[in-house]
Amino acid sequence: MLIPIRYNLRSLVVRRATTLATALGISLVVWVLASAMMLAEGVRRTLGSAGRADVAIVLRNGSDAELGSTVEEQQVGLVLAMPGVRREGGQPIGAGETVVIIAAEKVGSAGVSNLQLRGITETGEKLRPTVKLQDGRRPTPGADEAMIGSKIRGRFKGIELGQSFDIKKNRPIAIVGVFEDGGSAHESEVWVDGDIVRSSFGRGATVSSVRVKLDALESFDTFKTHVEQDKRLGLLAMRETDYYEKASEGTGKFIRILGTLIAMCFALGAMIGASNTMYASVANRRREIGVLRALGFSRIGILISFLFESVLLALLGGVIGVVAALGTGSLKFSVLNQSTWSEMVFSFQPTPSIILGSLVAAAVVGILGGFLPAVRAARVSPLEALRG
Amino acid sequence: MTLASLAARNLLRNKVRTSLTLLGVAVAVVTFLLLRTVVAAWTGGAEFAAKDRLVTRHKVTFVMPLPKRYIEDIRAMPGVKASTYCNWFGGKDPKHEREFFGQFACDDGYFDVMSEQQVSPEELAAYKADRTGAIIGESLAHVMGWKVGEVVNLETGIYPADTPWTFTIRGTYRATSRNVDKSSFFFHWDYLNQALPEARRDTIGWTISRVDDPARTAEIGVAIDRAFDDKDTQTLSQDEHTFQASFLAGFSAVLHAFDAISLAILLIMTLILGNTIAMGVRERTQEFATMRAIGFMPAHLRWFVVGEAGVLGLFGGALGVAIAFPLIQGMLGRFLEENMGNIFPVFRLPFGATVAALGLAVALGVAAALLPARTAARVKVTDALRKLA
Amino acid sequence: MNKPDDILIRLRGITKTYERGGESLCILESLDLDVPRGSFAALMGPSGSGKSTLLNLIAGLDKPTAGTIDIGGERIDKLSEARLAKFRASSVGFIFQSYNLLPVLTAAENVELPLLLAPVAASERRRRAQTALRVVGLEDRMDHFPRQLSGGQEQRVAIARAIVNDPLLLVADEPTGDLDRKSADEILTLLETLNEKLGKTIIMVTHDPAAAARAGVIHHLDKGRLSVEAHGEVHA
Ligand SMILES: Nc1ncnc2c1ncn2[C@@H]1O[C@H](COP(=O)(O)OP(=O)(O)O)[C@@H](O)[C@H]1O
Ligand SMILES: [Mg+2]
């Protein structure tokens, strides 16, 4: 025989101040957990959506990232001539790109951070068909002009449409356009003509990486084999999706592990709070429980009823926490990404499974915190009903 | 008997509740201190940076080097006592793909300028005598299991080579200050330079200079930058503190997040304390009414409740510190310093945060008690007594 | 010992109304009452007639809607909350139906409690508590906690607490209400002794005619009015 849920609801309402204090404690746990998971998901999506499965990236052997990689200019031609590369009108689709980092002053906080500058060619956008102009126009090839990703717009000094930054002393680059790319990592980059980047930074006849479009998804293996076969080239090939997946690994893992650890500490605190509340609830209702027992409700029934009350309390906190986390999610999170050494802007990405998982975590806190008090309630003897 | 002992008895009345509350506060304090230690370990380097050292690098980007001849100009600047230079190598041990540690090709004066990285005279001499020699941090030696005399191969995408770079470990350095990394790898700049193709030779990543008057560090930095302003590569000179702080600026969002989470912990602690006090006050309405009837004033009861909360906060906080101290200082700190020295060179409980945690536990206990204290002081005596009769 | 016109408690035109759900409820209406110093008065009346309300007014726990209360020459209806608290601490001893001892304190410590409000040294507090407990015959139970005592013993500790600061006046609200006949008799005898031997003025609310019979005078409260009944004419 189960005790009606109304009984638990009323008990929570009667003790509303305590109920709310406990629920708020649990909501903080859920807030931290859900925010961290949403951010980790944001990192995965941002870096993940920058890559395409039908594009391959070629780097110097031993480098994980474009920044630390150098490819000789004459090797670019060799790579483009490899089998598996898509051709249009006899021309291979692919290009060498140069990536450097520039220092930029942050707007609104003291300090200089690093921005990724990508020297591109006209083929650059063919490799990234998702890039769309959001504002302004595209830079003229060969001119001292740049377009910037929408996420960094206005976050750094000079990085805004109509403004300019110095790539070198007395060599300003005018920002003429802002582009978007479905939330990808490119939206945290500045794009300038590749030749200008190379000459300004004295890179000589080298680029950072070569990207090629594959003529079919399955051509990657052929392409990779050919690139890596020639040991004298000293190059390696990766699918662009794998490259970015790897790049997001470090930061995403860092956030996920840290978030989980902190949430676990929080959960311990909140569990203790829930225990306290439920113990008080049981102590105040000994007589009531005695009456219920005398009426014929079983020990198990009492146990379930109190556990249920505790879970209800925790779920209330869980819902508050999820709502708060969704609120935090409207913020942008800008952080130095470990694998690119440059600042990237990430957003909090809620998913149904994160929300569900957070609520389950709240329920677990409720069950664990409420268990011992529920056992105590179940131990109350029917004789309590008769005591004064 | 005194009012204080009465308050103390009340705390012991509900032992389960008091223990749970103390434990809750302690957990919050431990979490808080852990977070603050992470933040301190991370940003601590900047705070302990030497005031008399200047770092000079490429003005636009740290990935581009400076011409080697700049070092001579900097050494000749008035006020500069000594100067050294390094290049970032960016390599990996192919046998330990996942271990990240910094490698630097530096000139032989490096350990004179960076006096906080101490190498024994014998090992330093052995290092200087070997063209392919390397000096590594004690923490790196521990993590990688490298011994003096061992030969190590590194690969890098920045300086392509047909065969891996080979080094012989000639010694280890000990870090005597928080601002230096314990897990770096140093080798001879000449070794790197001579192996490079003609076009890439004779460049340096950055220079580190010691000035003779710490008060003039900024001024000398400006003078250095002015000297190169007309050359084709401009420089940016920052004192070591600014240099490290600007690096941290990239992580400011993470640090803000840590601050927000620290705040949330304090909030949880306040809720736990407030809840306990409120429950206690609600259950003792009759007793408060009796005391009022006997002649106690509302102010007495207010102090009574607030004092109880303060004591609860103090003991909970003390318990937290008592747990955090061996946990962070002993176990976790030692482990992280030895195994993650590149991120957390010094993982030690910051004294200020420890005192703050104790103070906050008391202050937040008192703050959380203000509302219940008001309730206690406002007990309608006649009504409360009637409920009994 | 007392001059008959030495009046300790003088109530004039006492009215008490409660606001309940918008309408006002008149519990006491223009009451006059004189209680001579050193007397033992009982207050009887049906449940809900306002006995406790009247007792609380006399004890300085509550204020009248209208009228004056004069206790030992002091107009307590005019006092501030703080002064009233001081008045209660120094001049009134309370005895409740359900004893209201603090469960975390021993018998001696409960008795000491009111002395914390007076500038009395700790050793002196202890001594006075001991004396008060001797008066109620519980000297040997000093270090027992309330839950280790019987109801009658608890009420005797409460009486010791009420007399420890040597008040002018003892007020008791149904002090025997929770007790069995035998314990109740002991309590009443104790109150009689306090009245006769120590000269305490006592006002006692009670339901029990046998208890009221121990008092020198019985006041009846009904429908907001008081009537006095001389000793011996109680039984109908
Ligand atoms: N604070 C209050 N608000 C409203 N009504 C009250 C309040 N206190 C007492 N009363 C009412 O006054 C009447 C007298 O109460 P009380 O003096 O306790 O009666 P008695 O002690 O004679 O049984 C009762 O009807 C009670 O309901
Ligand atoms: Mg009554």
Image: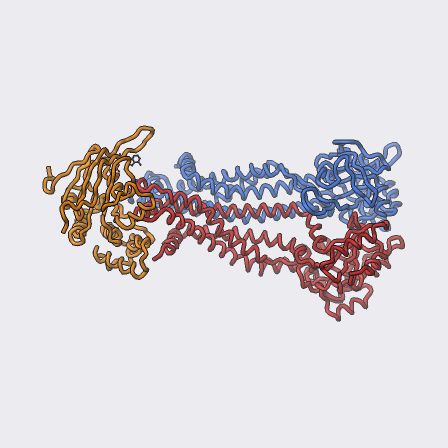
Q: Is residue B147 above or below residue A284?
A: below
Looking at the picture, the colour scheme in use is: by chain
Q: Quadrant of the C terminus of chain C?
A: top left
Q: Is residue A226 visible?
A: no
Residue A306 screen position, x and y as percent: 42, 41
Q: Is residue A74 visible?
A: yes
Residue C64 screen position, x and y as percent: 28, 37
Left or right? Give the position of A290 relative to A217. Answer: left
Chain C drawn in what color? orange
Kindly indicate the quadrant of the structure image that contains residue C79.
Answer: top left
Left or right? Give the position of B295 relative to A155. Answer: left
In this figure, what is the number of numbered marks?
0
A51, C134: nearer the viewer: C134
Left or right? Give the position of A48 relative to B326. Answer: right
Q: Is residue B91 above or below residue A50?
A: below
Chain A drawn in what color? blue
| Residue farthest along the bottom direction in this orientation | B122
Chain B drawn in what color? red
Residue B249 screen position, x and y as percent: 69, 48
At horizontal 27% and vertical 46% (from top left) the residue drawn is: C98
B313, C196: nearer the viewer: C196
Residue B14 screen position, x and y as percent: 39, 51
Kindly indicate the quadrant of the structure image that contains residue A45.
Answer: top right
At horizontal 42% and vertical 51% (from top left) the residue drawn is: B308
A20, B383: nearer the viewer: B383
